[in-house]
Amino acid sequence: GLTAFSAKSYGRILGANDRINMGVIGLRGRGKGLMNGFSAMYGDGVFIKTVCDVDSEYHESSRELVAEKQDGNKPDAVQDLRKVFEDPEIDAVAIATPNHWHALGTVWACQAGKHVYVEKPSSHNIWEGRKMVEAARKYNSLVQVGFQNRSISNVMQAMIKPYRAISKGTLSAVPYDLGQTGIAYNTKYISKAKAEKLGAALLWDKDLNKKLGSWGDWRTNIWYAALKTGQNPNNIKDMKAVWNALKVQQKMIKKYWGSGAELMSLLANEEIYATVAWSGRVAALQAQGHPIGFLAPKNCYSWQECIFVLKGTDLDVAQKLLDFMLDPKCSIAVAEGQKYPSSLDPTKVPMPASVQKLPAFDPTGKLTKYLFADPTYWNSHQIEWAEKWDRIKAGA
């Protein structure tokens, strides 16, 4: 979370400054961490000029802490945060005061022409948050709230990217696991070589007439019909070809399943030999000893499960939950239990063999062969396509 105040980024903001002068307000807990972080940037042109805390007992120890990384240069120490804002030589402040001071401290800092890093929670209520935004815009200040998660840097960036795209660079959801809706097939009746050769077309194999299954979901069926007709599921050009493919397949389907339990039952009892299937359910069948293979064809339908942070959420509570879910021990336990790979990047967080062998696991952490649904594209067609799919599924 400290990179927002790097010398490189501030050089673009403040002009050709040789040094960025910082003030750190609140010297206990997170304040101590901020002092360590910013003073470590001393060699990059960041200088903590002043430390501030209403309790002067923490002044000298904080000055010494900072001086250790600033070539012995001790910062000034004050008790009143307004003294920091009044100093024309200070460019930016980091606020780690008790929570009820976060909003007012940010507004005052903006009014004084400072850039601000403020710890979570940003405000006591929505009204205060809006005033912080208004102040940042009015006084042309950069304000960053420290809603970082200690493990967020370990999450695969390919999983976070779609959320940042939707919310214009911010992050309102954190993924905790990864899955794919690929193709499950019974290896007693379908060889791996055949499955890999046919790819999505396996779901239209005439040899599997009335031994095919599918999920009742409109999106999944249209996605695979797009693959069957050689199209990008996120940019379908020929919907007529998709509908025709689904009409042909409908006559070959023995059962459209409606739950994970039904999917597993159909495969385990050999009522069907091939179907679209959730990777975690296939892993569960494999763990039970059933001869079920999993195929992830090119542009396999990939997805993730996430925790959304809604407007009005108590950010302290949300932070604790996200920290818990992304703690490697918890994340790995969830992956092993649900049989879906963790969202944590395996190149940063070592994964046990039990997770590495799961379908949908990507050892590179880059997910270059995974395709996620474009929400804007699919949501814009949902009403029309879902209604059309329901008619096809019913045999109309």
Image (tube, rainbow, N blue to C red):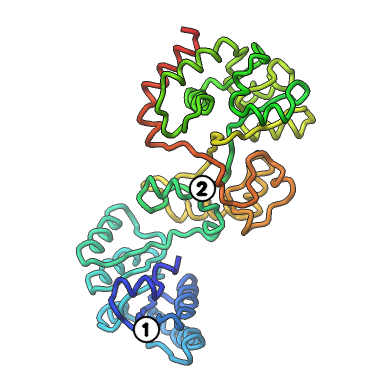
Q: Percent position (x, y) of residue 289? A: 79, 30
Task: Name the image quarter holding residue 82.
Answer: bottom left
Q: Residue furthest top?
A: 396
Q: Percent position (x, y) of residue 323? A: 54, 55
In front here: 135 or 255? 255
10 Å neighbourhood of mark 1: few (<14), some, or many (≥20)? many
Provide the residue designation for mark 1.
50
Identify the image quadrant of the N terminus: bottom left
Residue visible at 73% across and 45% down in the picture: 354
In front here: 379 or 261? 379
**Mark 1 and mark 2: Cα distance apart in space:** 39 Å
Which is more N-terminal, label 2 or label 1? 1
Judge whether 14 appears above or below 296 on screen.
below
- Secondary structure found at label 1: strand
Q: Percent position (x, y) of residue 221? A: 51, 23
Provide the residue designation for mark 2.
159
Judge whether 45 appears above or below 343 on screen.
below
In front here: 382 or 47? 382
> Is 98 on the left-hand or right-hand side of 349?
left
10 Å neighbourhood of mark 2: few (<14), some, or many (≥20)? many
Q: Which mark is residue 269?
A: none
Residue visible at 63% across and 57% down in the picture: 347
Q: Percent position (x, y) of residue 35? A: 46, 77
Residue type marked 2: Met
Given this view, does label 1 or label 2 mark the residue nearer the observer? 2
- Secondary structure found at label 2: helix
Residue visible at 58% across and 44% down in the picture: 177
